[in-house]
Structure formats: structure tokens, C-alpha cells
Image (cartoon, rainbow, N blue to C red):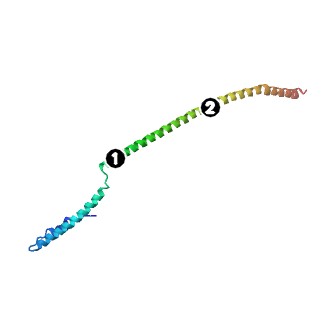
Amino acid sequence: MGSYLCPSDMSDVWHKDEGNGENMDILEQRVERLEEDTRQIKLDLAVLTARSENFATKTDVAELRAELIKEIAASEARTNIRFEKIDEKFERIDEKFERIDEKFERIDEKFERMFEKFNDINSRITWTLMIPALVAVLLWFVKTAILKI
């Protein structure tokens, strides 16, 4: 809502200076104009007063600021607690992986021992079965092909 107070609007009424009985008419016009302006000022003041009831005071802003600081601090505390719990979970997971690594190392050692045993068995088979068999085949070949017995 705008105000009707504008000096350019009133310049023609305020500055007329005519003689005789018109000074009274000009004065009446000026008073009427002042009454209108006063009414408009009262309306504008009522509107501004109504609006000002919803304005935040310094105390309201300070209280809101304090509440926000408390909420942020509480949120940070909750976040820190969550991160601590996550860190604990990661530590437990790391411990489990270490135990798994130890088990794999033991399994690797067992496989190495088994591989050594298979190598021993393989070399025994080679020396106890294959060499005598080859010697027997070689002797048979010599007997049959060379000696023709």
C-alpha cells in the first residue's frame, strides 16, 4: 500500500496565492488534504504495526542461533559416534582378515608338505617300479633282438 504524500502533488495547492476570499478556500483545501494524508499515514502505520508483530527480535535470532548451535553439536556428536562404531567394525573385519590370512598360510604350508610327499612318492615309484621295468624291457630286447634266444 503506497502513501499519498508526494510534494509534487501538493505544490499546486500549497503555493497558490490569490487574493480576496480564495485564501480561505485554499486553506480549506490544504486542511482537507492534510486530513486525507493523516488518514493514509494512519493506515500505513497500522499496516506496518501489523507486519512488525511478525518481525524477529534480536532475542529470537539469538535463541534460534543457540538452538542451531546445539543441534549442530549434537549432530556432530552422533556422527562421531557413528564413525567410531564404523572404525570398530573395520578393526574387527581387519582382525578377521588377519586370521583368514594365517589360515591360508597354514594351508599353503600343508600343500607344500603334500607336494614334497608326492615328489618323494614319485621318485620312489620311479626308482622302485619304473627303473626295474625299463631294465627288464631292455634285457628282454637284448635277449630277443640281439641274442635271439
Q: Along the line of sight, which residue is nearer the eye, 147 or 16? A: 16
Describe the element under mark 1 as helix, strand or loop: helix
The C terminus lies in which quarter of the figure?
Answer: top right
Question: Residue sitting at 29 percent across and 59 percent down?
Answer: 50
Q: Which residue is mark 1?
A: 63
Q: Along the line of sight, which residue is nearer the eye, 41 or 81? A: 41
Tell me if residue 144 comes above or below residue 7 in the rendering. above
Q: Position of residue 46 (x, y in %)?
A: 27, 61
Q: Which mark is residue 82?
A: none
Question: Residue sitting at 28 percent across and 61 percent down?
Answer: 47
The N terminus lies in which quarter of the figure?
Answer: bottom left
Q: Which mark is residue 103?
A: 2
Q: Residues within 10 Å of mark 2 (few under 14, many from 20)?
A: few
Question: Residue sitting at 82 percent across and 27 percent down?
Answer: 133
Identify which amino acid the numbered label 1 is placed on: Glu
Residue 16's quadrant in the figure? Answer: bottom left
Identify which amino acid the numbered label 2 is placed on: Lys
Question: Residue sitting at 30 percent across and 49 percent down?
Answer: 58
Could one spot residue 96 in this view of the protein?
Answer: yes
